[in-house]
Amino acid sequence: MTAAAVNRSLLLLAGLRFYLRHPGQLGLTVAGIALGVATVVAIDLAAYSSGQAFEASTRLFRGQATHEISRPGDSLPDDLLARVRRDYGIAMSAPTVEGRLRLAVEPRRSISLIGIDPLSAARVGGATAAFAPGASNFAGLMTQPGAVLISAAVAQELGVETGDELKLLDGGGESLSIIGQVPGESGERYLLADIATAQEILQRTGQLTRIDLRLTADQAGLLTSQLRQEGLQLRPVAATLGQVDAMTRSFRINLQALSLLALLVGAFLVFSTVSFSVVRRREMFGLFRSLGARRREVLQLVLTEIVVLAAAGVALGLLGGIVLGSGLVSLVLRTIGDLYLSTSVDYFGVSLPLLLKAALIGFGASLGAAAWPAIEAARAPPRRAMLRAYLERQGRQAAGSRLLLSVALACAAAVLLLFTRELRLAFVGIFMVLIAAAVAAPPLVQFSMRGLAAASTWLPLSYAARSVAANLSRTGPAVAALMIAVATFSGVGLMIGSFRLSVDEWLSYSLDADVLVRPTDSRALAASGEEADLLAELRRLPGVMDLSLSRRRALPDGQGIATLLAVQPAVQGRWPQSEQPRARVLASLARPDQVLVSEPFARKRDVAEGDALSLLTPAGEREFSIAATFVDYSTDLGLVAMELGRYRQLFGDQQLDTIGVFTATGQTATVLAQVEDLADRRGDLRVTTSAFLRQLSLLVFDRTFTITQVLRLIAGLVAVIAVINALQAQRLDSRREIATLRALGFSPGQVLRLGEMQSLLLGTGAGVLAVPVGILMAWLLIVVVNRIAFGWSMVFVIDWWLVSQGVLLAAVAGLLAGWLPNRRSLRESPAVALRAD
Amino acid sequence: MRRVLLIFSLALTGLLVGVLALREGSDTQSVQVRASVRSLLGPGDEAGFRRAEAPGEIRLPRDHGPHPDYRSEWWYFTGNLSGESGREFGFQLTFFRFALAPTAPASPSARSSSWASDQIYMAHFALTDASRDEHRVVERLARGSAGLAGARLEPFEVWLDDWVAQSTGVEFLPLQLSARDAASGMELVLELSPGKEPVRQGQDGLSQKGAGSGNASWYYSYTRLPAAGSLQVGGEQHAVSGFAWLDREWSTSSLDAGVQGWDWFSLQLDDGRDLMIYSLRQVDGQSAPQSAGSLVARNGNSRLLSLNDFELQPVQSWRSPATGVSWPLVWRLRLPQEAMELEVRPTVSDQEQDLSVRYWEGSVDVFAPGGQERLGRGYMELTGYQPPSANSLP
């Protein structure tokens, strides 16, 4: 009993001493865990907070509303609420005008301004939050131009209070007066104003964003049919919430998977540090074993150590994750806003279950990663564990079975990736591929180093290569971690690069006109029948070759998630980007009852060329046949294209969103000037060039992938940590080798160069190995994940410069990381080092 | 005379807060609302509004339309109706207008949004089904812009949602009233035809409500307008006819301190005479000196009544199970000079209206004291009564 207790504390003390004597190991282990956990927490919290923001902005001021009237991508007319109440007798109805603006105090971040009619909001039970008993903001909001209430989060973040003025960034010196605060301490960021103030500040007079309603089933039925005739949509509020969820699901899963990837890389780091610490101490463990310590006790020691380290890492990771997450949430919200729909409030909140989950994952990954080395340590027979050569031999023997395991894993992954249509499983497949590569990495590096040693006629090189190969029992896990990190770095980079190229290519098809003209009030244009005159006038301008016309609206299929694009393409244009020849596609489009669908639409609805698609027209349901699919990255929610004339005939909607003007070669500038003149004269046109829009689109693209880039950089960071780890392991363990070399007469300089060559070889070896893994990963992300998640197909382009960056990263990291250990190992007297072992 | 409305206008800000809070249905909140209303009974911010000062300004038809330069205003329709089967109903459809701020000449036009408005409309729609002992009331509020609510003179119309009072021709009368509320199943469509000429209450329409100049309202009444149409209540449609009463009042004034509430009566007697009486009830239980009324003869001639001309006595109370308020619902009324002695009894006891402000407004029958023969029908309004616990509040 007593002996066992002494034993245990002795073991623990020994473990503690090891880490105290090697603070680098301690730091690396903790950092590896912390980095992984932080990434998971940050991404999870950002995704969670963005979800909360959507939920909050959907619920905010809606009270018990059951339905909403909206027009996706468009506003509602000002008089609609009065008509809904007076003509349809629907009393429980409330209007909202929403938009974002920038304040002078916070020029880089926009904030949402929500305009409500307090009396209407009360009818659907929605404004109670804003007007608690005792608050007397009501009259001020309605009667004072520019009066706003601020949310608690705004008061706190901007340090403003009632009575302060908020200057608008681009409002010509206009400012808002804070007349009060919305009660409550929730984290949403917004300004609340009377609807009239919101219309004026946002320059949306005459427009409503939506109308919330509390309806009975009968009322809903009546209203749905009435509104359809006006091209308006009545939707249940629950559907709106569900829609947000459905729209952003793939996006969120992608983010989470990428964060788990970061954790996976982190886990490799833990694996490598723990393995190293075990390998380093195998003589000590052997000694303990010969002194009577049991296997279980050794196992317990290693696991206790890792639990303590993991606790520190997880704690740091949670803290770091919260900080990183608060930064990422606005990125996530902006991206979702760019891609899907924008929220009216910003929100950041910490969810305890999410933190708990991340902590558990952190502990799980650490223990999982440490399990193998811990078992190894416990398994070593007392005597043999003290022989260092034993382990090297054992490692070499295991190489064959490692490769087998790796191949088996890879095959399983391939099967999974080939057959799954489930995003989560696709990511599981990618993880398996990475693990397979990691398992195979040490033996592969060993083989290639041996090959290099054999092939090289230059003694120092073959010596260094052989030395790297011989030390792989210690450096193997770190090499695997380095390889995975570099592969992630370049794989994700390749995916983004290919995607960007594909989008750029697509933009050249979809923005095929040179100058784009948008009527500011196409309703008026359509109503007054002036459209024909405008088009004729545009055609008459010298240099104008052709025009294309288009109109976008929610797809009338009862779901309203996808978009209907009504087009009259130009003969000399390039749209649409399809596998079929353009002439044939356009000919099909011209036929009545034929439509084109975008790739994501085809993928998500599981339809193909020749299939039928039914749409709700004012005259009832109508069948269309799908003539072709085309490439479209504008939305992953799906796009259906129809010929404009046919659309107008069927839907009675005469409005136009965009007129594309095609110019003769070299005439764009002159045409642009003339169109701008025309717009100045008329006052109801907005003019822009497609070159500008293209730039803007790519900007949005880059913004979308900011988070992915952040994750990529984290992978890069892990790579550096891994290589430091590997080299420390190598250096610390080669004291005797260096001493022997010195004793044999090598100069310190020669020994240093030899060490540096080893560092370089180790880094480069892992880096080169990461090349095919990275390429494979990119290919899987593009071909499997993107197709499943978004339905996009894209070209796969290998950017060799980016790939070599990965190798370079590994090599340079190797060199730099080896700098200090290499020098430090020279300081020791050869005699002392030789005796010590 | 609807003094309850003065309170509405005085208490407006706190009140609207209260409306919103009341929707939550929390008891603590309604107590807070009542407390805030009581606390706002003092003088409100009257600066910038016009006031009713010198008599003789009422011009018709001009004054049927809105007066946005006064703080508050109402079009108050009540009446008693009979169905073909002998069923009896009472109705109330009232439109209130409140100004949140004085309308500066420049302010509304300076704003570009058509939603901008300083005016708020409130409407109460109530039906009493005497035969079934039922009463329902609904309140709605809307801003006076974007077509949600408003009033205009030519052709006359006042509306809030699909609750509308509008002239059917170029003349003010005949008028059509229509209101429906899906949730409560109430619907009313009535045509009001010309009856007796309007009566200017008080001093040629200037009705003094407190001591001092300006503490008065402009007040005229159509005491008897033949009404016919249909109503729907409890899932049944009824063709109805009877007489309506319209009170028009606008002012910028407040109650004197020490006035607790009031008891108001509009009675249409079967002999063709119409009687309006109000008593401003002081904290000491006495009627304030400004309490007054008018008696309109069959031929439309009217005689003003001052406090000395009538005696008003509550004889029986009813305690509301919902609010605990004890309302005096049976009254004895004496006009010694007219040798008139009447007893007023409610057609339905529970015509309590627990809305933005709690009051009792409902249809009544008129009898000789203790008698069983009905002499007429009318409407009664009681305000300022508190449940026993609330009375003990400071």
Image (cartoon, helix red, strand yellow):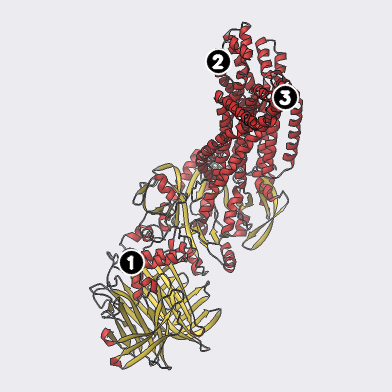
The amino acid at mark 1 is Ser
Q: Do circles 3 and 1 both sit on a common chain?
A: no
Left of A61 or right of it: where is B14?
left
Quadrant containing the N terminus of chain A is top right
Tell me whether circle 1 and circle 2 mark residues in contact (CB < 8 Å): no
Quadrant containing the C terminus of chain A is top right
Mark closer to the chain start, 2 or 3: 3
Q: Do circles 2 and 3 both sit on a common chain?
A: yes
Q: Residue B118, relative to residue A818: is it above or below? A: below
Q: Residue B46, relative to residue A711: is it above or below? A: below
Give me the disc on residue B39.
Answer: 1
Left of A553 or right of it: where is A596?
right
Q: What element carries label 2?
A: helix
Observer-nearest of B293 and A558: B293
Q: Is residue A311 visible?
A: yes
Q: Name the residue under label 3.
A: A381
Observer-nearest of A85 and A359: A359
Q: How many other residues sit within 10 Å of disc 2, few (<14), some (14-19) or many (≥20)?
A: some
Tell me whether circle 2 and circle 3 mark residues in contact (CB < 8 Å): no
Q: How many other residues sit within 10 Å of disc 1, few (<14), some (14-19) or many (≥20)?
A: few
Q: Mark 2 points at which residue?
A: A823
The amino acid at mark 3 is Pro
Observer-nearest of B300 and A747: A747
Q: Mark 1 lies on which chain?
A: B
* Outermost residue to the top: A745
Q: Residue A321, relative to residue B314: is it above or below? A: above
Indicate which label's residue lies in the foreground, 2 or 3: 3
Q: Position of residue A126 (x, y in %)?
A: 48, 60
Give me the disc on residue A737.
Answer: none
Left of A771 or right of it: where is B272?
left
